[in-house]
Image (spheres, rainbow, N blue to C red):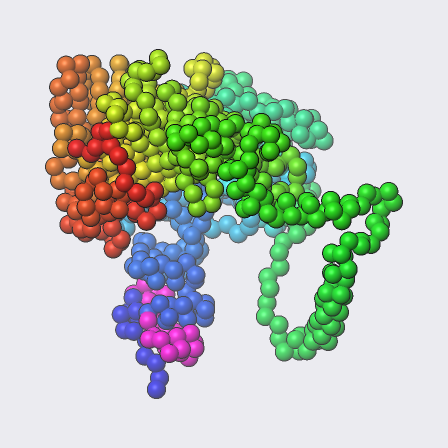
């Protein structure tokens, strides 16, 4: 019986212009082979069409995800996703009537939709009127709006981006870079004559064609979609800021010819040296580097570069715009026009770059030709395996073949066996011995030993060996060994000998209980990770010189740290609980006179029991707090800021599967004064359940003046996040302690839904009782929002200040 394709699928494909009924019917045999005894789902037909190359992999994935109708945008049909530009969705698309392939940028609904649409129309008109479609530019030539989506089309350019070439092949020869620079300037001079600037000169937006031409993509697009850059706009990947002019970060100036000149110098520097001129592992670090604009002398990394090109690059990357070349025409006059010789050199370089050839299926004659060598190779492999099986016991018995190098030392059998046994057994047997039975003298080094609360003497920690599979090839890259805490009882630890990048954990399957000192456990090493540790505060606030406002379980004094599977709580008897983490960064506020620092703290699978605050931030600069699958029961704010962020101090709060129950607020901002343009506070919540105490708002401003300027700086986006119906979004508490509910109309909030939330049990019964069992709002997923208790530290926690 002939398989009949689903009618609705066929109708959708015909409506989109992807395939007709006959095209779908032709893959019926392939569908039967793919499905076997299973029902012929729509996805099977879609996969069969993709295998038959009727659909592209991107189109098949979109249809299977239920987004097939979105493949058509205006008169275009989306064919594949394109990674650049990073600030907008971009696709390879095909015009339904003409069949022309274009690079299509699609912008979703935004508050600036009218402004963006009008600016794109103007750009397309100028591009067409001024005839900018030269061999050096691929400008926006058409634009429109379809179903609240703005689209802009530019010609599709075949080739490889300079960024991709650099990743796979390293730096380019100087004569090739000179030709690329001349190509770029030829297009940028045309833009300058038309009264435009590019605004996004980069290696990712520069296509190198096989015939030796270089093309700049979509000039003017970034200036329209992102007219402002700086610390308040650190939402892109780090490489998106590689060529950003310093004045755009410092002063927030719009794109200009001076910025394009600076970007050209950075791009040429990158192609000559093989790496980006600015360092930085994240977006905020890149922005700081762009603001400083401290680019090394080109001759240090590429001394063979000709003097004219080197001098031009040095002039382009000057920090002050007034010291750079005043125009693209002036820069082009220095470097000259594209030449046939240079075009040939670029084409030869691309041809010799070791392009990976496509692998095609072997035909029957080819399989026959390869059969004999394959049999010979198989026989050789069998002989080698047999020889290895015979020689292995002899080698293990202590006899080794003499070294091929004269004078090479050969280890004795006992030394070898000792090292192998230690390497194999230390993570298990030796670890148990060191943590439970051995004292300092037995371990051979001064390992601190602290008395447990029950009088037993328990070693607090030891450094575990790194398994052989984790050892990198280079000795200089050897990571620090894990710091493993003992588990024979509560550990009273004053400090830990931490090193940057170290992991602090317990024995496998065990959870150390750490009793911290009155001032909190100090952490002064960068990027330390704590795993599966229960932190306990067992002091009265104010004891031993610690004030109640300064009390904290962990005293974090670095820019980066992570806590995974940890719990924070106070023992019974303390009327004023501490904060879980007091984050002070930088330790000295004048450490970064030119640019502000940035920091990031991560919490995952953690529980915070009734404490004064989750993270008490006393930081300067940009900060990011990432919290996932975490339960905050009772107590004070999950995050507390000690001042209103300034314009260059953006705050990013990323929440995923977080439950806030009977406590709060989610964010508290204490301030003395507010600048006219405060820094942006971005809150991103995914699958969270925010049920604060009835007297607490989700966002609390604590200061002497009404916080209206701060309200406009908050950007809250959520997906599948629930807020209890009675919860107040924002409130202000003045010096008199009276809390005033604020109008949240000026706060940008999207994706957060109000809904009743039902928990599995009483909050005092442990994390499992805070699992959400019912809710009223419709969600895209059937999984309950909030923290998943299966991955949280189990057990009941005693509360000095239980959830209200």
Q: Position of residue 481 (x, y in %)?
A: 56, 36
**Which residue range is magenta in the image?**
13-41
> Would residue 409 appear left or right of 453 to someone viewing this image?
right
> Would residue 160 appear left or right of 54 to someone viewing this image?
right
Residue at the spot x=32%, y=44% of the render? 794
Q: Position of residue 718 (x, y in %)?
A: 26, 41
Q: Position of residue 720 (x, y in %)?
A: 25, 46
Magenta includes 474? no
Magenta includes 27? yes
Depicted 308 relative to depicted 28: above or below = above
Tell me the quarter of the image containing the N terminus.
Answer: bottom left
- The residue most toward the right is 406
In this orientation, which residue lies closer to the viewer: 607 or 10?
A: 607
In this orientation, which residue lies closer to the viewer: 145 or 537?
A: 537
- The residue most toward the front is 455
Depicted 771 relative to depicted 623: above or below = below
Q: Quadrant of residue 518?
A: top left
Q: Position of residue 289 (x, y in %)?
A: 50, 26
Residue 396 visible somewhere in the drawing = yes
Residue at the spot x=40%, y=77% of the render? 36
Q: Quadrant of residue 31?
A: bottom left
Residue at the spot x=62%, y=56% of the render? 356
Tell me the quarter of the image containing the C terminus.
Answer: top left
Q: Quadrant of residue 588?
A: top left
In this orientation, which residue lies closer to the viewer: 41 or 296?
A: 41
> Would residue 116 appear left or right of 386 to someone viewing this image?
left
Residue at the spot x=34%, y=62% of the render? 64
């Amino acid at each position: 019986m002939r398989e009949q394709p689903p009618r609705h699928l066929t109708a959708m494909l015909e409506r989109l212009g992807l395939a007709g009924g006959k095209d779908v019917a032709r893959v019926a045999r392939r569908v039967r082979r793919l499905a076997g005894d299973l029902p012929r789902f729509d996805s099977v037909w879609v996969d069969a069409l993709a295998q038959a190359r009727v659909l592209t992999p991107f189109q098949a994935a979109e249809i299977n995800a239920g987004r097939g109708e979105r493949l058509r945008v205006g008169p275009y049909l989306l064919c594949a996703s394109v990674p650049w530009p990073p600030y907008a969705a971009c696709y390879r698309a095909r015009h339904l009537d003409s069949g022309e392939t274009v690079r299509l940028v699609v912008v979703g609904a935004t508050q600036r939709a009218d402004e963006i649409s009008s600016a794109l129309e103007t750009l397309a008109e100028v591009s067409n009127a001024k005839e900018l479609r030269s061999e050096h530019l691929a400008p926006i030539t058409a634009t429109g709006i379809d179903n609240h989506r703005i689209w802009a089309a530019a010609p599709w350019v075949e080739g490889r981006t300079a960024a991709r070439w650099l990743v796979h092949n390293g730096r380019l020869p100087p004569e090739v870079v000179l030709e690329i620079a001349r190509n770029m300037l030829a297009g940028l001079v045309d833009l300058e004559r038309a009264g435009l600037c590019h605004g996004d000169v980069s290696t990712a937006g520069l296509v190198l064609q096989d015939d030796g031409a270089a093309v700049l993509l979509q000039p003017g697009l970034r200036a329209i979609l992102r007219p402002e850059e700086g610390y308040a706009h650190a939402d892109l990947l780090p490489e998106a800021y590689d060529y950003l002019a310093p004045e755009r970060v410092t002063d927030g100036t719009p794109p200009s010819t001076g910025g394009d000149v600076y970007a050209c110098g950075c791009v040429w520097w990158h192609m000559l040296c093989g790496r980006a001129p600015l360092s930085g592992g994240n977006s905020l670090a890149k922005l700081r580097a762009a603001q400083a604009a401290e680019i090394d002398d080109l001759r240090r990394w590429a001394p063979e570069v000709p003097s004219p090109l080197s001098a031009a690059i040095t002039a382009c990357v000057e920090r002050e715009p007034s010291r750079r070349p005043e125009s693209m025409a002036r820069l082009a006059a220095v470097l000259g026009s594209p030449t046939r010789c240079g075009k040939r050199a670029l084409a030869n370089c691309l041809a010799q770059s070791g392009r990976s050839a496509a692998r095609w299926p072997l035909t029957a004659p080819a399989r026959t030709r390869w059969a004999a060598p394959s049999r010979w190779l198989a026989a050789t492999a069998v002989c080698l395996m047999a020889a290895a099986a015979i020689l292995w016991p002899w080698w293990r018995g202590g006899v080794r073949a003499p070294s091929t190098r004269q004078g090479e030392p050969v280890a004795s059998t006992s030394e070898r066996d000792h090292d192998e046994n230690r390497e194999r057994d230390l993570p298990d047997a030796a670890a148990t011995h060191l943590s439970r039975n051995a004292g300092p003298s037995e371990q051979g080094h001064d390992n601190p030993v602290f008395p447990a609360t029950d009088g037993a003497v328990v070693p607090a920690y030891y450094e575990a060996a790194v398994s052989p599979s984790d050892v990198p090839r280079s000795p200089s890259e050897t990571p620090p060994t894990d710091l493993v805490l003992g588990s024979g009882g509560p550990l009273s630890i004053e400090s830990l000998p931490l090193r940057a990048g170290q992991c602090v954990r317990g024995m496998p399957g065990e959870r150390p209980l750490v009793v911290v000192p009155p001032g909190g456990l100090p952490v002064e090493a960068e990027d330390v990770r704590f795993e599966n540790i229960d932190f306990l505060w067992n002091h009265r606030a104010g004891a031993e010189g610690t004030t109640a406002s300064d009390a904290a379980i962990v005293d974090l004094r670095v820019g980066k740290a992570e806590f995974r599977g940890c719990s924070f709580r106070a023992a019974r008897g303390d009327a004023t609980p501490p904060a879980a983490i007091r984050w002070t960064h930088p330790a000295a506020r004048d450490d970064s006179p030119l640019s502000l620092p940035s920091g990031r703290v991560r919490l995952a699978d953690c529980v915070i029991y009734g404490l004064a605050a989750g993270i008490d931030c006393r930081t300067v600069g940009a900060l990011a707090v990432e919290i996932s699958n975490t339960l905050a029961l009772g107590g004070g704010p999950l995050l507390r800021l000690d001042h209103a962020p300034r314009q260059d101090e953006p705050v990013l709060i990323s929440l995923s599967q977080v439950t806030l129950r009977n406590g709060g607020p989610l964010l508290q901002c204490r301030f003395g004064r507010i600048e006219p343009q405060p820094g942006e506070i971005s809150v991103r919540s995914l699958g969270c359940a925010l049920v604060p105490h009835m007297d607490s708002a989700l966002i609390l401003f604590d200061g002497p003046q009404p916080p209206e300027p701060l309200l406009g700086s908050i950007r809250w986006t959520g997906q599948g996040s629930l807020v209890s119906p009675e919860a107040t979004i924002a409130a202000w508490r003045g010096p008199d302690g009276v809390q005033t509910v604020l109008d949240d109309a000026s706060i940008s909030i999207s994706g957060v839904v109000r809904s009743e939330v039902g928990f599995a049990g009483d909050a005092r019964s442990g994390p499992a009782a805070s699992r959400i069992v019912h809710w009223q709002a419709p969600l895209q997923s059937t999984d309950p929002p909030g923290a998943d208790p299966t991955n949280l530290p189990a057990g009941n926690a005693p509360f000095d200040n239980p959830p209200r």
